[in-house]
Image (cartoon, grey):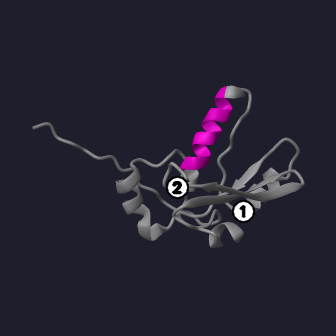
Amino acid sequence: EAVRSSRSDDRHVFGYLAEDTCGIITITNPAYGLETETLQVFLDAFLSRFPGIKIDYIHGSDAVAKLGSQSGNVGFYLPPINKHHFFQTIMRDGALPRKTFSLGEADDKRFYLECRKIVTAL
């Protein structure tokens, strides 16, 4: 809940859980528009330094709590993307990072469309 309520344009805030430790990460003046982008850039750099590490993209706070509390794991709680600004975000920032969005709760079945910009040559 702290992650959802602390949204701001000049910072990204997300929670983490690692075994019996949890906390809030705040990135001020982020270089990217979405928290998922900020985290993914970090994860990509981390994976390049530690190639044996594996990432599993999951949805739902219960799944994050279950997996993040296991030894050797870290779970991140990211705020939901505002569905009312979804297309404006894509127009402003371009394609979303992989596994960025899940509209609705993890227990609900959702359908997604992948869209690509088609440009014709003149």
x and y percentages locating residue 37 in the rendered image: 54, 48
Q: Is residue 42 above or below residue 1?
A: above
Check residue 44 for magenta coloring. Answer: yes
Q: Secondary structure at mark 1?
A: helix
- Distance CA(mark 2)–CA(mark 1): 19 Å
Q: Residue furthest left?
A: 122
x and y percentages locating residue 11 in the rendered image: 58, 60
Q: Amino acid at mark 1?
A: Ser
Quarter containing the N terminus: bottom right
Checking the image for residue 106, the label placed there is none
Circle 2 sits on which residue? Answer: 34
Provide the residue span drawn in magenta. 37-48
Quarter containing the C terminus: top left
Q: Earlier in the sequence, mark 2 or mark 1?
A: 2
Tell whether 31 sits left or right of 51: left
Circle 1 sits on which residue? Answer: 61
